Amino acid sequence: MVPRAHGRSINTREICEISRSETLDMLEEAWDDRTKGELTLTKLHLDEYVVCFLIQKCVAELKIRIRQPPNGTSMLPNNETRGIEKVELVGCTLEDEEAAYCLIRLFQMMGKDLKELFIVDTTAHRLCSEGLTALLRGLVLVKSLERLAIDGVSLCGSAIGCAMETLLQQTSSIKEFRLMDCDIDEETVDCFIDGVRVHRGLHHIDLDGWEIDDFQLEQLVDALMESNSKATLKCLDLSGTNIGLDSLHSFARLLRQTQALEELVLCSCYTLFEGVSTDSPSFQEFLNALQSNTTLNELRIGDSNLQDSIATSLVDVKLNHCSLQVLGIMNEQDDDEAPPPNNSLFPIPSLAWLMPASN
């Protein structure tokens, strides 16, 4: 039933105006409530008009900053003294390409302070593919951005894949890509790998939940070894992927050839060690590479169905390896107040699954 006001029906235009007015009120509140250099927009419909409203707020703040005396009391909300360093879009909808281009303009106006963009879809892929594609393309123009995190978003399709590849190819500032629990297809993976191959030096890659296989992992490692990332990569997270025994060879190569790798995360890779024995050539190659590596500080492989013999071999390396500080091999779902299972390697609560270096 169409709602009524003062005895008459409210038309579609009026309903849209009411909705937009509510959205602007929420934007005003989010802008004024930002603290510690973070702006969080939650469950908002971002069209061209709404984003332009944010641009006006940004312009007004820039004028205040220009007039503000040096070392004086801040004239901004919450006594805020720094620019926006992080933007979070949580469960927001992006209407179209025009809205995406306006959002890029907003990011540019935030200047050199903006370092991180976090996009999380909490409502089953509400972001339209056209808007997301335009946003990824436009991020090349945001020269200050160093970290891009996308969580729970559909990255399927050649258009989005090509946009992501272009972003990797043309940006040198973004050094951390965290693309977690995203829907992907073969085109997505291929485009991402091609982009990695020419990037000038990635520091952090998080592909948690990507359904990549042994062959695709081999291609990713090839791309890393062929690029400057060989000397810069510090963290690789491939938790929840479909990799198996053959991937141990790729990880051994990664450990041998990278020059700065500090953290390797392979949690919930249920088939990685499936059917592996301690005398398996692939596992021995991985173990030898782990022993000879001098940069790795953390290895996390919890929830990966490790046999006790495999876990024992890894612990031996940990105890006799000077650089490895943390070895995570226990199952995260074990309750820390419950007694450990009978076949557990460690008769200790599961919180001790992270084994710090001994004093």
Image (spheres, rainbow, N blue to C red):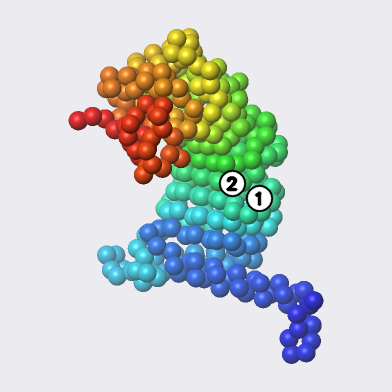
Query: Based on the displayed image, in which of its 4 quarters is residue 186 positioned?
Result: top right
Q: Can residue 241 be seen in this view?
A: yes
Q: In which quadrant of the rendered image does the N terminus lie?
A: bottom right
For image coordinates 60% across by 41% down, the residue present is: 182
Q: Seen from this angle, which residue lies furthest left?
A: 359
At label 2, the amino acid type is Gly
Q: Residues within 10 Å of mark 1 (few under 14, many from 20)?
A: some
Residue on which the image places disc 1:
125
Amino acid type, mark 1: His
| Viewer-side residue, 347 vs 262 | 347
Tell me the residue at 27%/19% (across/down). 320
Whichever of callouts 2 and 1 sits on the residue coming sooner in the sequence is 1
Report the residue marked by disc 2.
Answer: 152
Q: Mark 2: few, some, or many residues within 10 Å (few <14, many ≥20)?
A: some
Mark 2 in CB contact with mark 1 (< 8 angstroms):
yes
Residue drawn where x is 63% and y is 62% of the image: 45
Q: With 26 as the anchor, is 16 left or right in this view?
A: right
Nearer to me, 64 or 255: 255
